[in-house]
Image (cartoon, coloured by chain):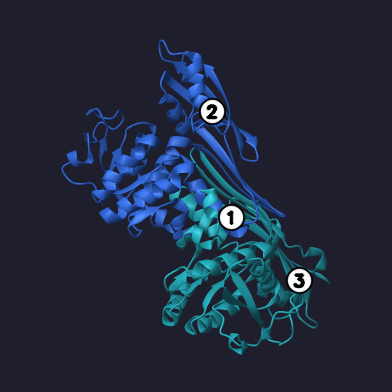
Chain colours: A cyan, B blue
Amino acid sequence: MKKIAIIGAGNIGKAAAKALLESPDFELCGFVRREEKAVSGFEKIPVGKSVFDFPEKPDGALVCFPSRLVEPVEKELLEAGIYTADCFDIHGELSAMRKRLNFSAEKGNVSCVIGAGWDPGLDSAIRTLMFSAFPENEIYTNFGPGMSMGHSAAAKSIGGIADAVSITLPLGKGKHARKIYTVLKKGADKNEVEHAILSDGYFEHDECSVEFVDSVKPFFNTEHGVLIESNFENQKMGFSMKIDNPTLTGRILVSAMRAAFLQKPGAYFMPEIPPCDFCEKGWQKYL
Amino acid sequence: MKKIAIIGAGNIGKAAAKALLESPDFELCGFVRREEKAVSGFEKIPVGKSVFDFPEKPDGALVCFPSRLVEPVEKELLEAGIYTADCFDIHGELSAMRKRLNFSAEKGNVSCVIGAGWDPGLDSAIRTLMFSAFPENEIYTNFGPGMSMGHSAAAKSIGGIADAVSITLPLGKGKHARKIYTVLKKGADKNEVEHAILSDGYFEHDECSVEFVDSVKPFFNTEHGVLIESNFENQKMGFSMKIDNPTLTGRILVSAMRAAFLQKPGAYFMPEIPPCDFCEKGWQKYL
């Protein structure tokens, strides 16, 4: 049984841990986090400041840090010969990151699956299948309404912000509005913070509005959804989900980890991997 | 540009020809059919009784015969070093056929993609992705209402039947009823024909009724649809299509042909192939 470490113990890290514990083919060997204290809900799982703190080197690691902190950690793991998967979610930076991590993966003689979350990730594989049948067509991805974990984390990392929840609202044809509920840090300037959000790469392409609140609790809800549409002449295809965002992301990360071990050394996107490689035994019954 | 022959000039063969002519990376080098006359709608395309009748050996061939006639033809092509794809659609026989054709493909040092139609095929890849995320869950595939080309062809091949159209009616949770509109051959016995249909492997597992008619024309309509559902706790996934059946099947066959050239020698199902391998250039924009 392959030993897998989880890097980060936030929402995604915990969801990935749950998914790992449910998988017959993996063993969760530990969490890596800044503070060396047990992860709530996973008190029996070892915790270290680095994967190299564990008694045995893990076979693989799920990198569950916010996207912008993923790459240096993943590079180090790969070069140390540890297979990885991440759910890096900045679409525009995927290709460049893949090139760099491909180099690290080849150096460590291992593989990684990058952008292996809900979107990019599962949705990318679905869109690629739609594109394969009707390449002339425009494919639209409509998210929400629901809380975007990536955008919420991105907002939270902006200076002057104590807490934030970013809600995605579908406008149709792949366009979205975002509402960012924001708790200011003491002494922070509203105008400066609002400007910092609206000009951030995560937000600048959408119609965004910022609302300052005392607590984001009333807006925090992990239910989310998507509708991917491809309409070509009289051919209509649609893929829809209503899901619990961290649960699905955790499941996909574990599937991607499974697939990583089956690929030749290198860095991969989900559409570059045979769907069966993500699966536990038994997929053939759905042929 | 790879030269592709089409074996069979029925609905699927013609749809595959149309899809090939629309593909920038393939050249349609000819039809193979019993009678050496031009295929209506494709008068400029060469016709032969065998792929070996063409001036140059094709690089690949799309086998567009009814399922039960596919294997011997495909075996011969593979062993002669010609890549193939087919839309063989008898789910229960896929694995055994794959084993045999895998042997032929390795012998000819080429690849084939089998069961590369709508279902099995595209739907299989979608179901495999759903299974990868939520393997505990039951996945239901609900077809129709619409005409099943495979079932219509299977009924037509039964003795005593001059023409037939089989309509698939969804009953929910993956159950279906089928109505088979049947034109008898002169002198054929209604009871015997009805029994032959209902005990055929294509029909015996579903709730079927046979209606004898003078012409199937009023019932012939290539519009069809599917809804694939996976519901796990609060996680719901659905894939739906409303499509023109031969058009989609032709497109998928051409995609599978493209993918065949990228695989190591052997026989493959669609879920065993990276989605990007089915694509023309440009899939990365949907990452």
Q: In the rendered view, does A216 fall on the left or right side of B205? A: right
Place residue A55 in its image quadrant: bottom right
Q: Specify the subunit that label 2 lies on.
A: B
Q: Disc 2 marks which residue?
A: B167
Image coords of residue A205 (percent x, y): 59, 64
Q: Residue furthest left?
A: B55
Q: Is residue B49 above or below residue A278?
A: above
Q: Specify the subunit that label 1 lies on.
A: B
Asked if both marks, 1 and 2, belong to the same chain, the answer given is yes
Which residue appears at 28% of the width and 30% of the height? B39
Q: Marks 3 and 2, how far apart in space?
A: 55 Å
Q: Disc 3 marks which residue?
A: A182
Q: Marks 1 and 3, how far apart in space?
A: 37 Å
In this rendering, the label closer to the viewer, 1 or 3:
1
Place residue A168 in its image quadrant: bottom right
The amino acid type, in three-letter code, at marker 3 is: Thr
> Mark 3 falls on what kind of element?
strand
Place residue A102 in its image quadrant: bottom left
Number of marks present in the image shown? 3
Q: Is residue A281 visible?
A: yes
Q: In the rendered view, does B187 fall on the left or right side of B168? A: left
The amino acid type, in three-letter code, at marker 2 is: Ile
Q: Specify the subunit that label 3 lies on.
A: A
Q: Marks 1 and 2, how far apart in space?
A: 28 Å
Q: Which mark is residue B131?
A: 1
Q: Is residue A229 above or below residue B169?
A: below
Image coords of residue B2 (percent x, y): 26, 51
Q: Is residue A46 above or below residue B2?
A: below
Question: Are the residues flagged by discs 1 and 2 in contact, CB closer than 8 Å?
Answer: no
The amino acid type, in three-letter code, at marker 1 is: Phe
Q: Is residue A187 above or below residue B59?
A: below
Which residue appears at 57% of the width and 81% of the height? A58
